[in-house]
Image (cartoon, grey):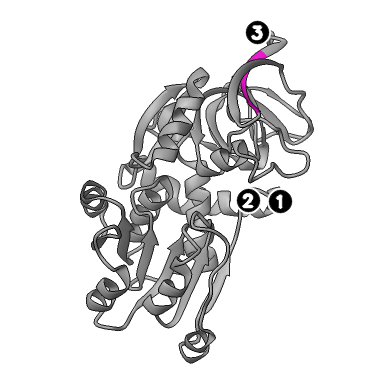
Amino acid sequence: MPLPEQMLAIEIDNGDLKPVQRPIPTIPANHVLIKVAASGVNRPDVMQRKGLYPPPHGASDIPGLEVAGTIVALGDNLSHLHEGDRVCALVTGGGYAEYCLASAALCLPIPEGLSFTQAAALPETFFTVWSNIFDRAQLQPGETLLVHGGASGIGSTAIQLAKAFNAKIIVTAGSKAKCEFCLQLGADAAINYKEQDFVEDIKQLTGNQGVDVILDMIGGDYFPRNLKCMADDARLVQIAIQNGPKAEINLLPIMLKRLTLTGSTLRARDDAFKAAIASKLLEKVWPLLASGRIKPVIHSTFALSDAALAHQLMESNRHIGKIILTV
């Protein structure tokens, strides 16, 4: 079946999201064209819309970092993928559209039993959580992980993966309902940061020992507070800075407790780096999804043309889990 020449896409226009018609992308070597059934909405999309997170060089200006759908065309040099394959993919942009280019190395089969909508919730959060908690921070069975923003897409993924690999999980969240959700999902403790001092609570929960790994999306004034929560030889991984990029810290605890402070962003990393993560997910995590032991948590779906409403919900912080656009 021939492809159309034009597609519906959502572009950024002076801070607004607007439906437009765009040409179907041409397909470079080692890439595939996916007819998008669903696309994940992520906080970096909101930042890009506001002009705070420009796409990497060569990436599409259309927002959207993860998609699920059907491969409808392939570039050169590919043999392991075929037209008609149902896949989800991590992309550097272009997800808010009816058709999206993806590196073949970053396409993963949709786990058995999952819908397109569920599969679109996987790539960005699962790649991010695996890369930072298990590869970078080296979380081990029996260790304690602190996740700030436990009810977010990243947080709900981190809870399930850490629990599946036998770690203890403490989370912070902004309401009683969100804390209860995190506990039901598998967290061992949940702290309402609007009503409680998470530093004092963590001291009590850990017998003044502290946590072994922190996954933080907040930054700013959370940074010195995180240091107070860390055990000897603990690791802090910074993956976002919702409270800003600057903090004043005391270096002495870093030295005395031998702390490791690190961070990362995923979008600008090359395909080889991301493909290594994809391989580990396929081996270690995809069977857990297929068995139903873990699952993506979806708060709500919006039509592609209603992407602006999806961003409003994202910015309200009322959601629990992922927000998905359906095509």
**68 and 302: which one is in front?**
302
Mark 2 sits on what residue? 274
- Per the image, label 3 sits on a secondary structure element best described as loop
Which of label 1 and label 3 is nearer to you? 1
Magenta segment, which residues? 7-13
Is residue 1 inside the magenta stretch?
Answer: no
Q: Quadrant of the N terminus?
A: top right
| Crowd rating for badge 3 (residues with CA inside 10 Å; few <14, some 14–19, many 20+) | few
Based on the displayed image, in which of its 4 quarters is residue 208 positioned?
Answer: bottom left
Tag 3 near tag 2, CB within 8 Å: no
Q: Where does the image place residue 31, in percent across and percent down from the top left? A: 71, 33
Mark 1 sits on what residue? 270
- What label does residue 116 carry, if any? none
Say which residue appears at 24% left-offset and 48% top-offset. 181
**Mark sitting earlier along the chain (3/2):** 3
State the separation of the CA atoms marked 1 and 2.
7 Å
Tag 1 near tag 2, CB within 8 Å: yes
At label 3, the amino acid type is Met
Mark 3 sits on what residue? 1
Compared to 314, does 167 lie above or below?
below
Q: Where does the image place residue 149, in percent across and percent down from the top left? A: 38, 54
**255 and 234: which one is in front?**
255
Compared to 251, does 48 lie above or below?
above
Tag 1 near tag 3, CB within 8 Å: no
